[in-house]
Amino acid sequence: MKSAVPWLQKRKTVMLIDNLVNLNRSTRSVVFTALIIIATIAMYNWIVAPHVTYLFAAQEYESAVSKAVEKNEVITDEVKAETKRREELYEQLARARNTLFTPDETKEFFSDLQAVSEETGCIVRSLNLAASEPSFRDDTSSIIANSAMLTVSGQYNSIIRLVEKLQNHPKKIWMYPFKIESIDFGSGQLKCDMTITAYTIQDKEAAL
C-alpha cells in the first residue's frame, strides 16, 4: 500500500497536466493568469510584505522620536523662560534692596520724624504709628511695610519743605494718602494729613 501512494500522486500530476493541455486557449489563459496572480501574491507575502512592515515600523518609530524631541524642546524652552524670569526677579530685588530700610534705619527714621517736621517749620499735631504689614516673603528675606499717620500744620512753604525733605531721603518713602487744606485763611495756615510708608527688608538669618 505504501508503494502505491507515490504512484497515485504522480498519476494525479500527469492527469492535471493532461487536463491543462486539453483546455482550450481562452481557458488556459485564465488558468495561467490565475497562477501568475497566485504566484505574485505569494512573492509579495514572502518578499515585499516584511519590508513594508519594517518600513511602517520605522516610520512609527521616527514619528515617536520626532514627537519626543519636540516635547523635550518645548520643556527646555519653558525651563529657560522660567529661569530667566527668576533671574530678572532676583536682579530687581537686588536693586530694590538699596531703596529699602533696614530694621534699625526704620526705627531711626520714625523716631526722627517729629524733629524733621519741626526743622522745616511745621507743627506736629499728631503722629501715630500703624501696624506693620508683610508685603513680600521668600526663602531668605521678607519685606515689611511700616507706616505712620502724620498731621502737621504750617505755612505753605514749610509744608512743601517737609514734603521735599521726605522725598529726598536716601531710602524710598511713599506718602499716600496726602491731603492739605486751609485752617486759617487770614494767616495762611494750612493743615496736612499724610500717611508715610517705609519698606523694611528683614533677612531671616539676621532675625534668628
Image (cartoon, rainbow, N blue to C red):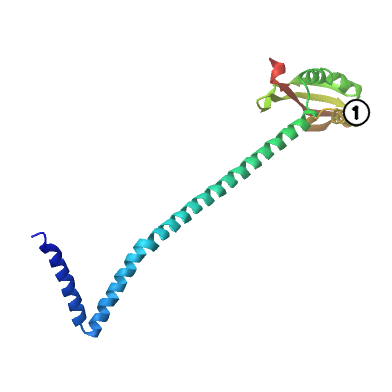
Residue 49 occupies quadrant: bottom left
The answer, for residue 175, to whether it is visible in the render is no
Residue 141 in the image, given as x and y percentages of width and height: 69, 24
Q: Residue furthest left?
A: 1
Q: Secondary structure at mark 1?
A: helix
Q: Amino acid at mark 1?
A: Ser
Q: Residue furthest front?
A: 3
Tally of marks: 1
Residue that appears at 89% across and 21% down: 118
Left or right: where 152 falls relative to 25? right
Residue 187 in the image, given as x and y percentages of width and height: 91, 29
Residue 24 in the image, given as x and y percentages of width and height: 21, 84
Left or right: where 152 falls relative to 76? right
Residue that appears at 76% across and 24% down: 149
Q: Residues within 10 Å of mark 1 (few under 14, many from 20)?
A: many
Q: Nearer the viewer, residue 82 or 77?
A: 77
Residue under circle 1?
A: 158
Residue that appears at 35% across and 61% down: 46
Q: Against 176, is 12 above or below?
A: below
